Every structure is written in C-alpha cells, then in structure tokens.
Amino acid sequence: MTVFITVFGIVQGVGYRPFVAAQAKELGVKGWVRNCGGIVQITASGDPETVEGFVRRLHEKRPEGAQVERVTVKPQPEEPFDEFRIDLSGKCKGHTGEAPVIPPDLPMCESCKKELQNPKDRRYRYPFISCASCGPRYSIMNTLPYDRGTTTMQDFAMCPSCEKEYQAGRRCHAQTISCHDCGPQLILRDQGMVWEKEEAFAKAADLIRNGGVLAVKGVGGYQFVCTPDKEDAVERLRLLKGREKKPFAVMFPSVEAIRAHCSVSDEEETLLKSVARPIVLLRITEKLFCPQVSGESRFLGAFLPCTGLHQLLTDTLGPLVVTSGNFTSEPILYRDEELLKVDSPFLSGVLYHTRRILSPLDDSVARVFEGTPQVIRRSRGYVPLPLLFARRAGKPVLAMGGDLKSSFCLLKGDRAYVSQYFGDMENYQVSRNYRNGLKHMERLLRIEPLSVACDMHPGYHTTAFGEDLALRITAAGPLKFQHHHAHAASVMAEHHLDGCIGVVFDGTGYGTDGTVWGGEFLLCSGADFERRAHLRSVPLCGGDAVAKNAVLAADCYRCAAGEALGSPRFEMVQAAIKHRINTQDSSSMGRLFDAVSALLGIREENSYEGECAIALENAAAAAKDAGKAPLFLEFPILEKENGEMVVDQVSLISQLLETVRADGDKDRIALGFHEALSDAVLAVCRKIRAKSGEKRVALSGGVFANLILLHQCYHKLIENGFCVFLNNAVPSNDGGVCLGQAWLAAVTQQEGSE
C-alpha cells in the first residue's frame, strides 16, 4: 500500500521531517518526506495496517513547536522503496495553493539551555546555540521552503561535526545548526578596538557591569542594554534614545529572579515562558532597581531570555535593562552597517555578529487580564502566525492599518496574517520598513492581494499608499472603513462575532461626519455600523499640539464648560476657538483623559504617548490602594431627536472643577472620574440593548490599556448580563486596526456575492 500524505500547519522549521522519518523507521514504513512551500509532503509505503498506524501517529503526535492543522491522505500507485529518506525540497505535488503557516522565531529550548551551561558540551557558552526545535526562523527566512539555503544561515558553511549532527539526532535537518567552529560568532567593537568570541563577551560584560550602555544584536534587531542598578547608566540610556520618562523593560535570567521584584500569577508565568517570550507587564512588589528604570509606573515590563547570548548575559550580570535599539520615533535598527555608524558619547560599544536579519522585529509586549493574555505590541514570537477567521475571504485582501503603531494584514481564505509593529508612518524609515515588510511577507506567503482595505482618513500615509496599490489592482479603488468601526471589527474577527455593541475609546479617528471621533458607541452588524452614542464634541485648537500639551487640552475643555479662567494662554485659546482658527470638533476620549490629568495637576504634558492618562490611572490606583472612596462624578446622557445619545463630558468637566475647588484630593477625584466613565459605559450599553436586543459588547481602542477602566467596565457589564469581548491576539490600540479592516473586507466581499 502506498499513499501520498500532505501535512498542513506549522511543520517547517520545527524538526518535522526528522520526526516523520523517525516514526516511519520505527514502524517499518518506506518512502520519503520533504518540505514543499509551506507544507510537508510524504510518500509512505508498507502493508495497510502499518501505513494506517503511521498516518494515525501523524494525527496524534508532533515534535515540540509544531502545530498540525490537518493531514490529508490519497492512495497512490504502488512504488518500491528500500528505505525512508528525507528528500531535498522540490516542486510541490498537488499543492492546494493555501497560504502557509510559517513558524515565528523560537526561543532557546531547555535541551539547548542545558548544553549552553554544560562545560563538557561542545556548545558550552556558544551564544547562538539552536536545534531543530528552537532558534531564529521568520527573521532570517528569505523564502519557502524553509531550508538552510533559503535563510541567512546560507552564509555559514557547516563544520564536519555539525555536518554529522545534521544527518541524525536532535539537530537532524536543523537549518540553524552551528557551533564555535562555524556559524555566527560574537564581535565587540569599542572605541576602535575589536574583540571576538569569548573575549568579546567578557569585555562586553565588563562594560555593562561598569555602567556602560551596549548595543546588542538580538533576534529581530539591535537592543540597548545596561544594568538597572546604576542611575548614571540608565540616564545615559535615556539620553542615547532620547526617551525622557517612559519605563524600560528588564530581562531576567529566570522566573524566580522576576518574583523578587514582581508578583507573578500562574497565567503570567505561562505567558513569560511561552514560545513568544514577550515582555509581560507585571505588578511591582518591591522596587530594587534605580528609580529611572520604571519611574512612577505600577508595572514592570519583565521578560526572559530567548537566545543563548541573552541567557549568558543575564546569568553573568543578573537582570538587565533591555530595550529596542532605536531612537525617539525611529524604527529598530537591524542592519549592522547602520548601527555601526551611530556616533554617540552615550554608547559604550556594539556586541554583534554577522548573521543577517531580513525582517526587523521589536520584542512583543503582553499582559494578563482576567486570566487571559492580551497582546499589546505584536512582533517577535507572534509574527507571522495567522489568525483564523470564521468567514473566508472570496479573494486575497491587503489591509493597510493606521498610521500610528502601524501594521498591515494579509488575508487569504480564512487565514489573516498580521505583520509586526512598525511605528509611526510619519517617519521615513518606518514607512520604508513597512513597505519592505509588505513585499517580504507577500513573497514569503505567496499572497497576491486582489483587494485593498484602508482607513477613511484622507491624511493617512497608509490610506494614500493603499489607494495607490488598489488602483494597480482594480479601478474600483480601496475599501475604506471608519477607524473605530475597524477597532470594533478587530474584536469581532478574533471572537467570530457577527454583531456587537462596539465601545471604542482612543485618541483620534476620522469620523464619517468629518469631525474627530474617539469616544464611540457603535452598533455593529456584519460590515455595517450605526453610531448610537458618543462623547459630546468639544472644539479643540492647536492641531497635533493638543495631543501632547495637556494644558492646552484642559483650556479647550474649560472654554467648552464656560469657565472664565485657565492657563496663562487661556485668552489665546478662547480667541482661537471663537474664530475657529486651527480648530476641530472632537469626541476624543484620549484628550478627555489628558485634560482631566492637567486639571487635577497630575500631569501637564505627554512626553510619550499616553503619559498623562497613565498618570491619571496611577492616581486612581493610589486612592484604591489607600482604601479611599471615589468622589462622586457623573456623565449626563442626553438623547437627540434621532435617537443618538450624547455622553456629556462638558458637564463632567464642570463637576470636576467644582470638586477640585471643594475637596482637592486629586487621587479620590481621579478614581471618581474612572467610576463615572464606567457607569456611563454601562448606562449607554443598557440603553442600546433595550432598543436593539444586542447584548454582546466589544471593548477596544488604546484607552482600554487602562486597567482600572477596563476592569470596571468589564465587570459592571458582566454583572448586568452582557457578554464582553476584548482584543487578545492583537492590540486594542491601532496595532490591531488592520485585522478589523481585513475582516470587514472579507464580510463585504461575502455580502456582495449574496
């Protein structure tokens, strides 16, 4: 009996062919196995009972890191085979044309970690140790099938010892196999001096130990590294990056080391140890590092090493600040020649190697909410794994995403591939990386989009790019979706919903009426939505400046509330709003948080995105931790003749100012603001449910990074009979918008064909 077998899923780059060969040889099956595109093909021959047992094993077993979606079996004419062999990759036979599932970069496995730390092993302290189950994948992959010659490992010839291991054992057909005698090697450059291998590592460790800041080449790009214990080292790092206040992440050698600083639940430990090895936001229990590391934050971004080099560094030096190797508003540096050109008095040296990176990837960021992981930044470890849609797209879709926290999504069939985080498209280098990343992923996944979806904002770079691409494909141009509708749709896509009440709070989004939206309650059904409620629009002046200057935002809200006094520039703000000079009407929830933060004297400027809102949340948390009751505030809900509801933030501002003058406890007022907003969310959702019958609620948008607000909204809604859904696999911020756009495009295609 001879059969032809096709295995779909994550079956390349995870040692699947050696696994298949081992199963076949154990059972006495003859034939061959090979990579083909993004799948694995097998010809198996033997007596019927043996072949059936072999196929059953393929369904039931898999090597670590593999994910088998399905196994198809077709009878073949009898073929004589002498053995079972691993074939070279060749032309696909009977390939379905489905987009493949490609493994992300995989963290060092426990077996490699033991070898790394074993003085008797030949790979003892080899920084780039890997095997068939671990090591870089997507970041070094040029095309499929996944073979050494299609990755940047083709630059390194295997030594005789590695050649031998490549034929059998744990590193059989491990494409990243290398050792001290071949493959990438450590290089340290410092003030014109060059060291290599173990000497490079020793010198690098000394530089960090003595307070230096080092650029270290990671899996997806460079990282800046320093000790968290020395104030001058962390200050130099901030000066190098141009990052004044935003907290830094810290890499620890083990979970036990993390527990000395943070509380770690079982779910958080699982997330820390997951294949993605993300930065996990954990509640700080004891601040043992210098204050400049995490600042005022209640949370520390903690993560574990994903490579042998990072494990060696943390084993030698203890916890380390490890942050993306970029400068303010710039993307991560990943080309050696670009980093080596950096001339800064704050950079002590560069620790790198010559294995090329093809896809730049920042570290991913995640947290656990109600026992479930939530991705906040989706990059290394998650990309390019697809999300599965309940609906299939009639034709392949490219969804452009937004301009801030930019990412795109390629959709083919029921598989949605969300790209890595790129950054702000205003920056030329970010835009370049975005375009290069799109070309690379299209080639790798073999997806040729026949439809383009984008935001309806006329000034977005992604919209202009999408329009240009769409016109090359179809004269109809791109499908344009409202920003907050796409946010809600991203939750619908994740949880396979056909409708919901979308509660979407963020800083800004272009509305269908030409105003700035940002505090929205949308009734969504399929690819359609109705704006059922929103924050009352307030005239904001100053253009983009109002997003950074919270005092300016506060003055605009004072004007709307009829206040006579404000900041020293209050009269200018009044005049600008009166004469509509550089003024836009806005229902932005993000700007409301900024204004409240400034009005309470908590924070007056966003030196990084969300700083004022985070400070306001911290004040509310301080009140909760101290057992203080929130001061009562209320958002009146007004109803227009057309049934649309308005959540009156202007009245809230008037109440808040009265409370400030009467009480002055900013922490209690901050907590009262959060309570009032969550009460308003519940009240509006109840009114929408009463009229529509819809009880599913999707919470999305960057404002829901606020855990106090999220917790209050989530539990109040649950307690009142709503089913609440959140973003989990993609960020709730603009990094998840592309997924919503892709889902809306697929639904639009489907509805258009009916």
Image: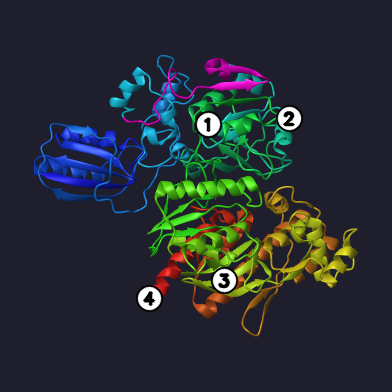
Mark 1, residue position? 256
The CA distance from mark 1 to mark 2 is 24 Å
The CA distance from mark 2 to mark 4 is 64 Å
Whichever of callouts 1 and 2 sits on the residue coming sooner in the sequence is: 2
Where on the picture, by quarter, is residue 324? top right
CA neighbours of label 2 inside 10 A, class few (<14), some (14 to 19), many (20+): some
CA neighbours of label 1 inside 10 A, class few (<14), some (14 to 19), many (20+): few
Of tags 1 and 2, which is closer to the observer?
2
Question: Magenta residues?
Answer: 173-201
Task: Give the secondary structure at mark 4.
Answer: loop
Residue nearer the viewer, 379 or 79:
79
Q: Which mark is residue 231?
A: 2
- At label 4, the amino acid type is Glu
CA neighbours of label 4 inside 10 A, class few (<14), some (14 to 19), many (20+): few
- At label 2, the amino acid type is Glu
190 to the left or right of 121: right
- At label 1, the amino acid type is Glu
Q: Is residue 720 visible?
A: no
Mark 4, residue position? 754
Mark 3, residue position? 522
Measured as percent of width and height from the top left, residue 214 is found at 64, 27
Task: Give the secondary structure at mark 1.
Answer: helix
Residue nearer the viewer, 83 or 366:
83
Residue nearer the viewer, 10 or 641:
10
The CA distance from mark 3 to mark 1 is 45 Å
Measured as percent of width and height from the top left, residue 328 is found at 69, 42
Measured as percent of width and height from the top left, residue 50 is found at 12, 40
Q: Which mark is residue 648?
A: none
Task: Give the secondary structure at mark 2.
Answer: helix
Of tags 1 and 4, which is closer to the observer?
4
Q: Quadrant of the C terminus?
A: bottom left
Look at the numbered discs 1 and 4 and tell me whether their residues touch, using CB distance below 8 Å: no
